[in-house]
Image (cartoon, rainbow, N blue to C red):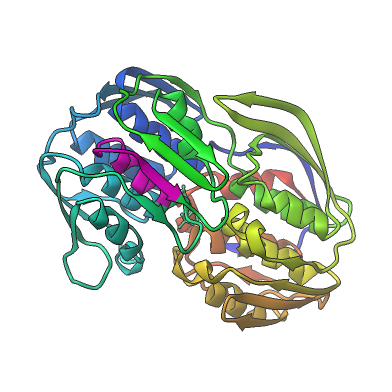
Amino acid sequence: MKFHQVSKLQGTVSVPGDKSISHRSIMFASLAEGTSEITNFLEGADCLSTIDCFRKLGVDITKPEPGRVIVHGRGLHGLQPPSSTLDVGNSGTTARLISGILSAQNFTTHLTGDASIQKRPMKRIIEPLSRMGADIRSEKNNGCAPLLIQGSPLRGIHYTTQVASAQVKSAILLAGLYADGITKVTEPCLSRNHSELMLRLFGADLHTEGTTAILRPGSSLSGQMISVPGDISSAAYFIAAGSILPGSDILIRNVGINPTRDGILKAAEAMGADITLENLRSGNGEPSADLHIRSSALHGAQIGGSLIPTLIDELPVLAVMAAFADGTTVIRDAAELKVKESNRIDSIVTNLHAMGCDIEATPDGMVIRGGRPLHGAVIDTHDDHRIAMSFAVAALGAKGETHIPASDCVTISYPGFFQHLGSLCKS
Ligand code: S3P
């Protein structure tokens, strides 16, 4: 795809449903008794992989209309052995969370995914799940998928994670549903808490104390009506573009603003962004709002510490904002960027550098000296959806033409992204 500079963004957009919440809704509904109905479900490739895996495990899942999914739960002990390998595609969330569930079943599963998934670290779940008694092996013995998971009896543990990761926390909690005894997960700082909120909604005996989630097994889950709020990670591209391009004025409707996910709002405001939250509401314990974004003069900021897990997926587009901001932005404590769908420190730094930005990589983030005008370039997305979308935003503020050859990957999390972005662009 080719992009040119535009003068501003104007109009209203509704972003698709939250990816993390969509995944969890299918998983927990599959393990529940009775029927669940999910609306505003994200029909991105990652969440469709989750549906595909649970169908292979015997769950009846139908999509009567776009964004509406009906799951006929099989209860905690009703999953069936799959007749073929489970393929999670590009989805780390599917791979890690489902491994917690599969570790406790009375059958064996092979699990794999695409080239990117086969490079992503799975030791972080293999280690705690093994401590619970799971028999889970990396088939190539390299700590990555493909995985062979032989269901086993599990015991509750108290696990302290090195890095705040909702995928690791959730895998352990899901295994804990089947364990003998209480399961506790303590994180260095709080990662997204959608699993905790939704497991409680479905009837699990779970509570939190500070950064520790505590699950007592024994309760069955029961089917629910879930309305998925819009994904703040998808809204982030419009927040950035609307802030960067002078004269912009946009409304992003129905965005999830769970405090464990709203770091992009805090970081953008620290950089001088003009964001107003309107129409605040809450459903299924998840707060949401409409976001009114007006362009403003941006300046550099320090981004690090406990803010990082709350905006980890937004760092690529935040780096783009920083390139357009006056002064220096330092992103630190974000070494996790290296093990996402691509090595995002590399993919951000090389692409922004190609567009003329003064940027350098550090071991746990990057330093961006913003304010230099950017020019068009050929972007290497590394087939990473968030890199493709972030650089489409950069392109709108850059002189000349930007070419993003491998842009189809946006369908992982936001199938209509380019149409939505185009509908807001004013030349
Ligand atoms: C996710 C957690 C985060 C995030 C990912 C989605 C989730 O990963 O980057 O896109 O849905 O639990 P980590 O748990 O590895 O930080």
Q: Nearer the viewer, residue 406 or 31?
A: 31
Residue 241: in sight, yes or no? no
Residue lying at 29% horizontally and 46% vertically, measured from the top left? 100
Q: Is residue 76 above or below residue 110?
A: above
Q: Nearer the viewer, residue 21 or 208?
A: 208
Q: Is residue 303 above or below residue 242?
A: below
How many marks on residues?
A: 0
Residue 390 pos. (x, y %): 62, 61
Residue lying at 18% horizontally and 61% vertically, measured from the top left? 137
Q: Which residue appears farthest toward the top when viewing the image?
A: 34
Residue 389 pos. (x, y %): 59, 58
Residue lying at 58% horizontally and 75% vertically, measured from the top left? 364
Residue 248 pos. (x, y %): 84, 49
Residue lying at 39% horizontally and 27% vertically, measured from the top left? 204
Q: Quadrant of residue 221?
A: top left
**Stretch of the chain drawn in magenta:** 169-185
For residue 200, side relative to residue 136 (left or right): right
Q: Is residue 126 magenta?
A: no
Residue 12: in sight, yes or no? yes
Q: Is residue 88 above or below residue 382?
A: above
For residue 124, side relative to residue 232 (left or right): left
Q: Nearer the viewer, residue 392 or 203?
A: 203
Q: Quadrant of the N terminus?
A: bottom right
Q: Quadrant of the C terminus?
A: bottom right
Q: Quadrant of residue 309?
A: bottom right
Q: Quadrant of residue 184?
A: top left
Residue 179 pos. (x, y %): 25, 39
For residue 118, side relative to residue 5 (left or right): left
Q: Nearer the viewer, residue 282 or 170?
A: 170
For residue 77, side relative to residue 367 (left or right): left
